[in-house]
Amino acid sequence: MALNNSGRGRLRLGAALLMLSTALPFAASADNATPISAPATTTAESNGISSFKLDNGMEVVVIPDHRAPIVTHMVWYKVGSADEPAGKSGIAHFFEHLMFKGTAKHKAGEYAARIAAMGGSENAFTSDDFTAYYQTVPPEALPDMMEYEADRMRNLILTDAVIGPERDVVLEERRMRIETSPEALLSEEVEATLYQNHPYRVPVIGWMHEIEKLNRTDAVAFYDQYYAPNNAILVVAGDVDADHVRALAEKTYGQVRRGPDLPPRLRPQEPEQNTARTVTMTDARVTTPSYSKSWLVPSYNTAEPGEAEALDLLSEILGGGLRSRIYQALVVKSGLASSAGAYFNGSRLDEGSFSVYGAPRGTAKLEEVQQAVDAEIARIATEGVDDQELEAARNRFVRSMIFARDNQSSMANIYGASLATGSTVQEIDEWPERLKKVTAADIQRVAAKYIKAGNAVTGYLLPAEPVQN
Amino acid sequence: MALNNSGRGRLRLGAALLMLSTALPFAASADNATPISAPATTTAESNGISSFKLDNGMEVVVIPDHRAPIVTHMVWYKVGSADEPAGKSGIAHFFEHLMFKGTAKHKAGEYAARIAAMGGSENAFTSDDFTAYYQTVPPEALPDMMEYEADRMRNLILTDAVIGPERDVVLEERRMRIETSPEALLSEEVEATLYQNHPYRVPVIGWMHEIEKLNRTDAVAFYDQYYAPNNAILVVAGDVDADHVRALAEKTYGQVRRGPDLPPRLRPQEPEQNTARTVTMTDARVTTPSYSKSWLVPSYNTAEPGEAEALDLLSEILGGGLRSRIYQALVVKSGLASSAGAYFNGSRLDEGSFSVYGAPRGTAKLEEVQQAVDAEIARIATEGVDDQELEAARNRFVRSMIFARDNQSSMANIYGASLATGSTVQEIDEWPERLKKVTAADIQRVAAKYIKAGNAVTGYLLPAEPVQN
């Protein structure tokens, strides 16, 4: 469940092949927080974290962190690439770029310069389910950032003179990040194969031939539909207090008119899948073969109670790091693999995915790596895990949450991403407790139920060699 | 390019695995016909075939055939499953069913009984690109059929009492035709893998979970958008003359009010594909393994001039029948295969597909069959075909057209399907001439250009055996 932060021009690449980065945790342990659905003008406060709604529908979460004179200011829009109209892939990410163009009050680049001058930073990222903008600045600059962010929520100047050159920037970005990368191209086709009906099939950056056709009409329609306070979440973490943030929010975001009510985010769902699929990319630039194997599994938002937590712990036990079964068996003991592991992408509004991956070391064959990984999966599905192993994995997992919590922007990310993918503040709060309830039997059950033969999608990245038709 | 006629409740299954039926030809040799875009009230006539437009925009084609006192009356709507809203898969086919429900004038079943009583027949079918309704009746019943068809074009009674039970019929149809058939389930997932972005990915009958949710609102919206004379083509073939048909059409269809103008049929197109994919279905009901391998190729509507014709002849030479290379090599000479061949699905509005398929005989292995088929493809791509072989294939191909032309309903089908997928009457007319221009070099070129390693989708249907994760 990596957030797949992307920066302006950065974006998630779906279940990227050989994605090794540690997943950002789903939630932190903010005990006893209250659901954000509390009545407007009421501040719910617990464990120091406050949440409330402005009159125009904008959600606000304030996470005090007084260790240093820094504040992280984020606005999350509940729209991502999976909400795009058919044939308009890339518009969510393209729009993220356009948000850095000017308004009547603030011309393009003005804030970038101002933030840089004060030693701060700003950026943005787009995923399937959300788009977010943030600045990290000294607390005294917060009012200014809020004024700026509230201004561009509705007042962008979207002329053809702005649109055309920025589309070229995005096209170049796609060329650089995707077209020149066999891994990225393979990853796109794996996702397009894994999701047969759901728009998670479509890459966040968009298909080249569709980006090329995005125009001013598309951009304005997208802006008018999705950029409004009632489709946004403000997260402020740092050296501030809730009352101060509320007062500032009411003066800035609170002055933005509520947009039209948005319909529920109902995307086409997956049919039952009955086939095992492979997707093979052969490329001269590849020197070592590698593979990934993915299954559709529930996400935190779609799972039966406890199943997503069990999948998180299954991924940790199976292949979550140096102590995991796959790493120990393939990398440490047999030395078959140079890399191997597992991960669960569960922080999505709709169906998630579970993946394993590996690459052979030395003279080992890719097939041997695959078989050894499959054997580890089968062993958990048939024999389960023991309680000690589960406890150790759970501790490692919770510890990574605590580390994340210790980081101001990670905390802001956790709240924003979770709220934008269907969670409530209460659910974020209760997540460590739910994790504690997962039993060894739960792990075995989700492994046997979801990670089974017959409907996985395996991606192969292979060095070029003569191929037949 | 089979028409994939479906009957009420019948429908195309995409590039069905092991589809052996001879493809229905694209066009017949109606020399010198005039484009249907001739001004309204003008009858274009050539080789006996007339075409004109009613004032409300309905296209009409009349194909006289006086050999017997029979007439084929068809209405084609330029809407198919690829025009459905996302998440509403199956609505085009479901609506085909609803067209047999009653209007205020004619209750459900009235016409079925009347047509049966006169020894006629009626049916309907839905494809990705069109939906068609037809009756074959004595000429004196034609006015009645036209009155009936014009009536249900706008006057269906679509109450929940009608919708609910018919949806159950469609769900049962899906269970019978798809869910119980490993071939059909595999075929669906092969198509969903072959088309990564285009709605041809979605089965015509719809995904089960989406059919289940189709309701009255969906049906009424679909009816109001697509069922109108300006989105329909009337084809009448048989023992009638054009003036008579025109007079009848003006009295019946001509009285139906023109609907709103429809936007161009622009569906999301495919990105560049860079991977070879496999889709494997393992099922206890399967006794002999088999495979199909498909490539995206241009259709008649999207191809560069001459390429679709060359693909048609390539499919004929490679695997179009008993005299084809694949059949002769694998079934007759080596005896490796019990069946093997090739086909081109080119009569589509958007991108088509080219497929080869095979199944081993006796103790032969599926892999041997695949390799032998691949070798035949490679041989054409590298060495080409000789002129004599091309001539023989062209003659066989044209002869099959002539046979089709000799059949009244085939002729009506050819005109309807071609006009509904972007052809003009003139293009249908000139098709045999274009076929004659294809050279041996053209065949080799399209084989090398489109039927290449690295981006095919192979479907495997395998007997059950122990599988690993």
Image (cartoon, coloured by chain):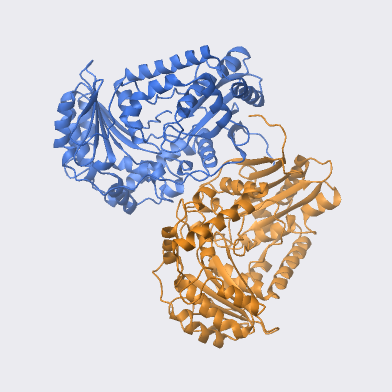
Chain colours: A blue, B orange
For this rendering, which residue is in front, A125 or B191? B191
Image quadrant containing the C terminus of chain A: top right
Question: Can you tell which quarter of the image residue B63 is in?
Answer: bottom right
| Residue A414 on image: x %, y % | 34, 27
For this rendering, which residue is in front, A248 or A290? A248
Total marks shown come to 0
Tell me if B77 is positioned left or right of A460 in this view.
left
Q: Residue at x 59, y 54 (%)?
A: B172
Q: Is residue A188 visible?
A: yes
| Residue B373 on image: x %, y % | 75, 47
Q: Is residue B54 visible?
A: no
For this rendering, which residue is in front, B119 or A369? B119
Image quadrant containing the N terminus of chain A: top left
For this rendering, which residue is in front, A27 or B403? A27
Q: Residue at x 20, y 42 (%)?
A: A56
| Residue A287 on image: x %, y % | 59, 27
Question: Can you tell which quarter of the image residue B369 is in?
Answer: top right
| Residue A254 on image: x %, y % | 17, 39
The residue lying furthest to the front in this view is B161
Question: Can you tell which quarter of the image residue A125 is in?
Answer: top left
